Amino acid sequence: MGKSSFVNTLVNRKSLARTSSEPGKTRLLNFYNIDNTFYFVDLPGYGYSKMSKEEQVKCGNFIEEYLKNRNLIHLVILFLDIRHKPTENDKLMYNYILRSNLPFLVLANKADKIAKTKVDSYVQDIKKELGITYSPILPFSSENRIYSNLVLEKIEEAL
């Protein structure tokens, strides 16, 4: 999904967070201290990876436990691939975040992979698929940094 690339892009460093060409490499919580002001916390992915079903369930429980028991969460960012419809796991996570009453942002990553003229249409498709009527979905691309200023503004608002 590009979570590590997202962290690197927003802090303007190439290798703070380790990236991999193989999805699903994050298996632990990774904490990134940003100027002693706040932390980005990279949680394991729950979607496409080479994890067994048992590992995916474990990972899902791990994510849920973290989100439920952490007191100082200012913003949860749900990463989706703009090129694809949300998966059942994406829908489950979105609904879990809604029920938890945590502040959140849906990020439609990999926006550089589609034509700029189609970004809004793809975002609307994701909103429709998830049943979002009031919350924004922000497109994003680590590759060419498009939309990164808007995402930074939303993070700053949450802090």
Image (tube, helix red, strand yellow):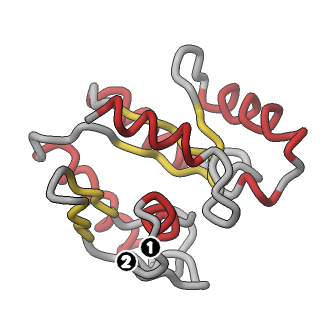
Please name the residue shown 35% across and 42% down the image. Answer: 76
Quarter of the image with the C terminus in it:
top left
Please, what is the three-letter code of the amino acid marked with disc 2? Leu
Please name the residue shown 65% across and 43% down the image. Answer: 139
Q: Are marks 1 and 2 in contact (CB under 8 Å)?
A: yes
Please name the residue shown 40% across and 62% down the image. Answer: 11
Secondary structure under tag 2 reads loop
Determine which of the numbered discs, if any, sits on residue 13 in the image.
1
Instruction: Where is residue 15? Give x, y as percent.
Output: 43, 81
- The answer to whether any part of residue 39 appears in the image is yes
- Whether residue 144 sits left or right of residue 115 in the image: it is left
Determine which of the numbered discs, if any, sits on residue 31 in the image.
none
- Whether residue 68 sits left or right of residue 137 in the image: it is left
Instruction: Report, in whole angstroms, how far the alpha carbon at label 1 lies from the one at label 2.
Output: 6 Å
Secondary structure under tag 1 reads loop
Quarter assignment of residue 40: bottom left
Vertical position of residue 33 compared to residue 65: above or below = below
Residue holding disc 2: 16
Please, what is the three-letter code of the amino acid marked with disc 1? Arg
Instruction: Where is residue 134? Give x, y as percent.
Output: 54, 15
Residue most extreme to the top: 134
- The answer to whether any part of residue 65 appears in the image is no
Quarter assignment of residue 18: bottom left
- Whether residue 94 sits left or right of residue 66 in the image: it is right
In this view, the residue in front, 149 or 6, is 149
Please name the residue shown 38% across and 34% down the image. Answer: 104
